[in-house]
Image: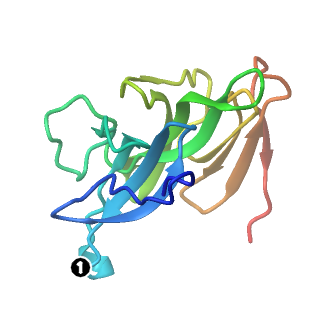
Amino acid sequence: VDLATMKALIVTNFADGDVDWVRWANDQHLLFGVMDARRGSGDQIFGGLHSIRRDGNEYRSLSERSMLGEGQRLLPYGTQFLQHVLDKDGRPTDEFIAETPRWTGRARVDTRLYRVNVANGRFTAVDLTGAPKEVVRWVLDADAVPRAALTVDADGRSTLHVRETATAELLTRQLPKV
C-alpha cells in the first residue's frame, strides 16, 4: 500500500503457489517465499527465495523453487534470509546474508552462507575457512561477519563455536546434552 495515496499495488501473482512470508530487504526491495496453500504439509514444495521492487518491477527468483535444479544460476533450494548487511548509518543495503542447508547424509545438515545482492541477483559464498563441519546455525555480528556456529553431532551433542573478534579462530565449548 502506498501510504501517500492509500492505493494498493499487486507486486506478484503465482499460478502455482501462494506467498508464504514477506519482509523488507531494504527501502526499495521486498523478499518473499512461496508455498502452495492447497497442498498438505507433507506434500509441500516450498517456493524458494524471491525479490521484487516495491513498485512491482524487477522480479527475481534468487533460489531454486524445488530440489530439482531449474538450470539457472540460482542459490540452492532451501535458501532463507538470515540477516541484513547494514551501511555505516545502520540502514539495510542492497545486500543481505542468506543461509542454505546442505544435506550431508543420514539426516545431517551443514549450513552454508551467501552474500546476496537483491538489486542484481548476484551472490557470493561467505568465506567459512576454518569453520566446523555440520553447522546447523550461524550467528553473525552487526557487520555480517560469522561469529558463532552451532553444531550437533550424530549422538545429538551440541557444540558452540565462538570467535572473540571477526578474525580470531573459533573457540569450542561443548554444551550439556539435554
Q: Secondary structure at mark 1?
A: loop
Write the residue at 31% across / 47% down.
77
In the rendered image, residue 53, in percent from the top left (x then y), is placed at 40, 39
In the rendered image, residue 43, in percent from the top left (x then y), is placed at 23, 75
Above or below: residue 41 compared with residue 126:
below
In the rendered image, residue 21, in percent from the top left (x then y), is placed at 45, 62
Residue nearest the observer in this picture, 158 or 146: 146
Above or below: residue 178 compared with residue 153:
below
Q: How many marks?
A: 1
Res. 143 image quadrant: top right
Residue found at the very far right of the displayed protein: 164
In the rendered image, residue 81, in percent from the top left (x then y), is placed at 51, 46
Res. 57 image quadrant: top left
Q: Amino acid at mark 1?
A: Arg
**Left or right, residue 82 beside residue 60:** right
Residue nearest the observer in this picture, 127 or 7: 7
**Left or right, residue 102 beside residue 60:** right
**Left or right, residue 87 beside residue 3:** right
Write the residue at 48% across / 58% down.
1
For mark 1, what is the residue? 39
Indicate the quadrant containing the C terminus: top left, top right, bottom left or bottom right.
Answer: bottom right
Above or below: residue 164 compared with residue 107:
above
Q: Indicate how the structure is coloured in the image.
A: rainbow
Q: Residues within 10 Å of mark 1 (few under 14, many from 20)?
A: few
Residue found at the very far top of the displayed protein: 167
Write the residue at 26% across / 71% down.
36
